[in-house]
Amino acid sequence: MMRIDVGSVALASVFMALACSDPITNGQDQENQSVLADRSSSESWGRGEDQRNDNADAKIELYDDCDPSDPGWTPTGGCTLKGGKVNLAEFNALLPSPLSQSVVGHPAWRFEPSYLVVAPGRKVELENEGGRLHTFTEVAEFGAGRIPVPALNQGLTLAPECALAQGAVDPNALAPDAEKDIGPLAMGNHKFQCCIHPWMRALIKVAPGGSGH
């Protein structure tokens, strides 16, 4: 008769249990722990990033993408960009649209961002990153600019704030690479536009909790 060593059976059972443990499950547990740690680290970094953004100066950049190699820009001030891609013909072609009764304008001529919320008491930094002259003019209502070219102002009525006496210097003008600060602004909404390219528009909202609070 065969004799069974109870102790040996018990020891073999222990080895079998260890051998049959699920290495995939163990690996998943370790991966889950790693993901949780990474997520915690990411969330902590995100909170720090939010704090840095809150303390940063608010800024709006003025853009265009004029092509400096196109002589078409020369009679009206030229183009100081090094790598712009838009020639005058393309710019003019995108002023109108058959689907609009008002000027549309080239999308590369823009304020970035076009909507900004800032905290009370904060200033806003402006910088002209384009290669053409622009203005950043506060207006009661968006309207036409002052350049007497119908295609630039199609369907719009002149914004009174854009009118300029002959020979006067516009204090709201920014040449390429120029910078200036505006504000602090009063609570509420403030509309700004370029008085040369009137589709370039921005709204600055002054409210608690905005940038720089």
Image: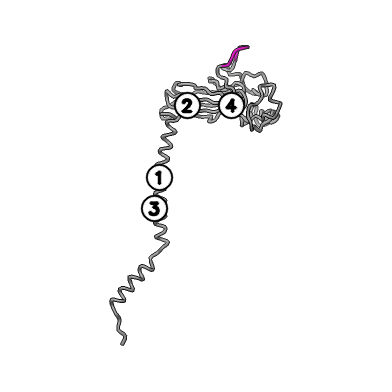
Given the image, on which type of amino acid does mark 2 rest? Lys
Q: CA distance from mark 2 to mark 4?
A: 17 Å
Given the image, on which type of amino acid does mark 3 rest? Gln
Name the residue located 66 percent from the left edge and 33 percent from the top edge.
Answer: 85
**Above or below — where is 195 with respect to 9?**
above
> Seen in the image, is 16 located left or right of residue 99?
left
Q: Are marks 1 and 4 in contact (CB under 8 Å)?
A: no
Q: CA distance from mark 3 to mark 1?
A: 12 Å
Q: Are marks 3 and 4 in contact (CB under 8 Å)?
A: no
Q: Nearer the viewer, mark 3 or mark 2?
A: 3
Q: Which residue is mark 4?
A: 200
Q: CA distance from mark 3 to mark 2?
A: 43 Å
> Seen in the image, is 74 located left or right of residue 111?
right
Q: Secondary structure at mark 2?
A: strand
Q: What span is colored magenta in the figure?
A: 164-170
Name the residue located 43 percent from the left edge and 29 percent from the top edge.
Answer: 212
Q: Secondary structure at mark 1?
A: helix
Q: Which residue is mark 3?
A: 33
Q: Nearer the viewer, mark 3 or mark 4?
A: 3
> Seen in the image, is 95 located left or right of residue 22?
right
Tag on residue 41? Answer: 1
